[in-house]
Image (cartoon, rainbow, N blue to C red):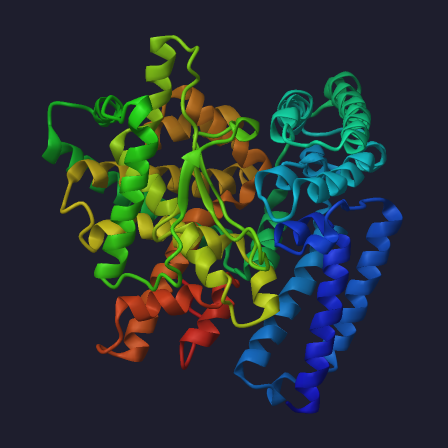
Amino acid sequence: MNDQAQGLAMLTEDFLNDYFAFYPTIASNLGLHAYDGQIIDLSANAIATYVNRLRDYQQRLAAIDAARLEEMAAFDYQLLHWQIERELWRWLEEREYQRNPMIYAYNAMVDTYVKRNYAPLEVRVAALIRHLQQIPAAMQVARQNLLPQLPRIFIEESLTIFTGLIVFLTRNLAEACQSLTDPTLEQELWTARDAAVVALQAFHDYLRDACLPMATDAFAIGTQQFAAMLRYNEQIDLPLDQLLALGERDLARNQQAIRDVATQIDPTLTIQQHMLAQGRKHPSADQLIAETRALLEDLRTFVIEHDIVSVPSTVRCRVEETPPFARWAFAMMSTAGPFETVATESFYYVTLPESHWSPEDIEGWLTKFDYGTLVAVSIHEAYPGHYVHFLHLRHAPTRLAKVCTAYSHIESWAHYVEQMMLEEGYGSGDLTLRLTQLAEALTRNCRYICAIKMHTQDMTVDAATRYFMQHAYMDEVTARQEARRGTYDPGYINYTLGKLLLLKLRKDYQIAHGPRSTLKQFHDAYISYGAPPIPLLRTLLLPNDDRVLI
């Protein structure tokens, strides 16, 4: 290791220590439990100190001669450069912490202490108590930081989130900690919990009573910030009109494809009628977990036998009923952090209908688990989607690569494999699976287009709702949920954007490496470096990157 590489190694370690100190909850979720019991300090002084440290790292990095670094050190150099620039933009220019109350919900999410047995319950509860004790001060900081006038939708969504957090703390936390036997610890826990609930309720009421009456319907970040978001977060620096045209062409391709598939299945039905018919074909409530387990094993076997991608562990993703304290989603993946050494198992949670529900409500819930959707979601979340990606991430070549990830890379892989698995023969040409896959793709197409139009072309939430209904064949309730999400998550463009970038890289990789290269080789290479920005990944996978991204 030469002096430049040594300097970079020291710089990287210093940066990560400061990064984890500023984001202790992220560090804890990554499996670094020395940071348990700490929360993010978003006070003006803490942010200013962090920004000054980032500028110092920026100067130290500029003093390193990247030309003298070997390949993986050069990769870390570029990754660190990207992460520092992204962090500076986030806190100096984007300033989401001043306009979005949802930012402050992250400090109140404490389920990580109880959903994974990485240490004895008493140890985890002691950290949980320390965390809860800091929530009242964090809510005061939130009031100090937020601007007087906030987007109405941000407030409305925040009210729902904080209500859910209060419900979790008041009703569900006791269920998760019911095996605790230390009376002193119990008393400290409920005292800290009660104080945290009071603070969260007060902040909820502040948003409702003080902020909501002054709210604005404006939410768009504007053309300049939207372009900056893509540039700093994803290393994408393409004209927005070009990106919009690419997204609209992909939407048109997928719309034609779903019409063709629907016609082949039954030309007398509309696409919406096809989807309603599919919704009625689902496992029963008492068989849903068992059938999902069998499905995941079938997917895993197909991936291995067809040389889709390496599965670097014999440990299965565990399919279990969603715990009582986490039943806010139909299904979700809960993976261990890449640095986790004890509780390394990953869970694919499936939420069953409540036993006291009416037969009509149970049936309505189960329609979300129709066989086509269950396959698509399981491919996306587990095999070979997020879970397999996580297994590779644990073996990423550098510590920095396990920490610094891009939205577009993570979702590009999971979205891409939904289509790729069918193209490689999974389902033996079952057209209902193809119909569902295309329906999911159309949803992501509409996210892409509406993100651009809502934030740079004055598209309203109502107009975006109609767009999802017309082009992704959604019901109005679901379409409005998607449109509202786009107001505070313009980055959901990255599902389709990432997939398009991946497909272009796959084509370039196959040309560069010739006919002897296999799909598995590309897939392994794509997810073996963690989840860096795709333009950066191109420099590793292509001998001569022409920088033509799409």
Query: In this view of the protein, can residue 230 be seen by the observer?
Result: yes
Q: Position of residue 89 (x, y in %)?
A: 70, 56
Q: Quadrant of residue 193?
A: top right
Q: Position of residue 524 (x, y in %)?
A: 37, 67
Q: Quadrant of residue 427?
A: top left
Task: Write the residue at 77% across / 54% down.
Answer: 22
Task: Write the residue at 61% across / 67% down.
Answer: 400
Q: On the rendered image, what quadrant is the N terminus found in?
A: bottom right
Q: Position of residue 181 (x, y in %)?
A: 70, 31
Residue furthest out toward the right: 45
Q: Which sits in the foreground, 345 or 269?
A: 345
Q: Is residue 328 left or right of residue 381?
A: right
The tally of labels here is 0
Q: Is residue 6 left or right of residue 445?
A: right
Up the image or down, 359 lies above or below 477; here it is: above
Up the image or down, 142 lies above or below 334; here it is: above
Up the image or down, 374 lies above or below 478; here it is: below
Q: Position of residue 404 (x, y in %)?
A: 60, 61
Q: Is residue 506 left or right of residue 50?
A: left
Task: Write the residue at 75% across / 64% down.
Answer: 17
Q: Which sits in the foreground, 442 or 224?
A: 442
Q: On the rendered image, what quadrant is the C terminus found in?
A: bottom left
Task: Write the residue at 41% across / 44% down.
Answer: 318
Q: Which sits in the foreground, 425 or 345?
A: 345
Q: Quadrant of residue 545?
A: bottom left
Q: Is residue 408 left or right of residue 176?
A: left
Query: In this view of the protein, can residue 96 be seen by the observer?
Result: no
